[in-house]
Image (spheres, rainbow, N blue to C red):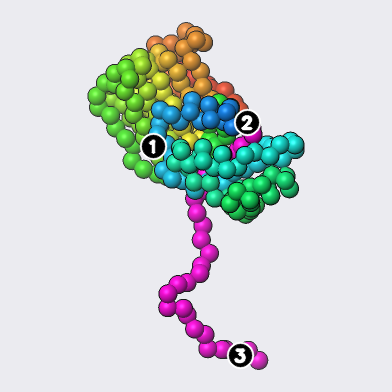
Amino acid sequence: MSVALAGRTPATFEIKSASLPLVALLLKTADLATLAQELHTRFADIPEFFDNDPLVLDLSPLRAQDVVPDFAAVIALLRSYRMLPIAVRSGSEAQMAAARDAGLVVTEDVQPAMRVPVAEKPAPAVVAAPMGALVIDRPLRSGQQVYARGRDLVVMSMVNPGAEVIADGSIHVYAPLRGKAIAGARGNDEARILTLCLEPELISIAGVYRTSEMPLPDEVRGKPTQVRLLGGAEGKLAMDPLQTR
C-alpha cells in the first residue's frame, strides 16, 4: 500500500535540474605562452566573440601527457577573453586534482554547445541559433570589420582589401570580395562563402583557411564562386563556380 506524506515547499528557494549552453575548450597544450599567443592571434580583433560564455576545459588531448597545466593562469587568461571556466573533464588523475584545487568542477556529464580548439589554427564547433541575416548595404573599406554573431552575413557592396567580414553562419557578398571573409567563425562547418567576384586576401570556414599567397584556380579567380568545406574541421576548402545566368 502506498503512503502519501505531507510535504513542505521552501518559501525562499527551489532546487531543479538545469541545462546550460556551455563552450568546451579543447586544451592541446600546457604551454601558457603558446596558448596566450594563439588566443591573441585568433580573438584579439574580435573582442565581442565571447559574451561571458560558461566553459568546460576538455583535457583529453593532454590526458596521456605527463604535464599539469597551471590552471589558475589558464582560468585568468580565458576570463580576459570573456570566457568563464567552470568545469573540467577527461584529464588524468593528477590533472583533474590540480583543476579541482583551482576551483573547477570535475565532471564528465556536460554537453557543450560548441568546442574551441586552441594552440592550432582550426576553430571551434557550434550550431548557431537561427537568426535573421545581418545585411550591410555599404562598401567596406580597409580597416573596417563586420561580425555577424550567431547568424549569416549579407554584404551588398564591395569588400575592399584590408576589410574583414566575419559570420558564425554563411557569408554572401553580392559584389567583389577582396578582403578577408571568415564564415563559420564558431565552428559551423556547414557555413559557406558566396560572392560574385572571388579575389580575397583570405577565406576561412570553421577555421580551415586559405590566403592570397596560394593563387586561386583560374576557373574561380575573379568569378562568381561558392566556397564550402569538405571533410569537417580537418578537411579542405572546395570552390565551385556559380552560374549567374
Residue 194 coordinates in the image, percent (x, y): 40, 24
The circle drawn on residue 232 is none
Q: Is residue 125 visible?
A: no
- Disc 1, SS: loop
Amino acid type shown at disc 1: Glu
Sequence-wise, which precedes: disc 2 or disc 3?
A: 3
Q: Does 93 sit left or right of 25 as displayed? A: right
According to the picture, the residue beneath numbered tag 3 turns out to be: 3
Query: Residue 73, located in which quarter of the rendered image?
Result: top right
Q: Secondary structure at mark 2?
A: loop
Residue 9 in percent (x, y) is at: 47, 80
The residues colored magenta run 1-30
Residue type marked 3: Val
Q: Residue at x 42, y 36 (%)?
A: 49
Q: Which mark is drawn over residue 31?
A: 2
Q: Can you name the residue that lies furthest to the left here? A: 138
Identified at 62% across, 39% down, the residue is: 70
Per the image, is 25 magenta? yes
Residue 30 in the figure: left or right of residue 179: right
Horizontally, is 62 left or right of 231 in the view? right
Q: Nearer the viewer, residue 109 or 139?
A: 109
Question: Which amino acid type corresponds to the residue marked 2 in the rendered image?
Answer: Asp
Alpha carbon of mark 2 to alpha carbon of mark 3: how far? 60 Å
Q: Residues within 10 Å of mark 1 (few under 14, many from 20)?
A: few
Q: Mainly helix, strand or loop, the magenta region?
A: loop
Quarter containing the N terminus: bottom right
Tag 1 and tag 2, C-beta contact below 8 Å: no
Q: Which mark is residue 48?
A: 1
Compute the Cα span from label 1 to label 2: 25 Å
Mark in front: 1 vs 2: 2
- Earlier residue among tags 1 and 2: 2
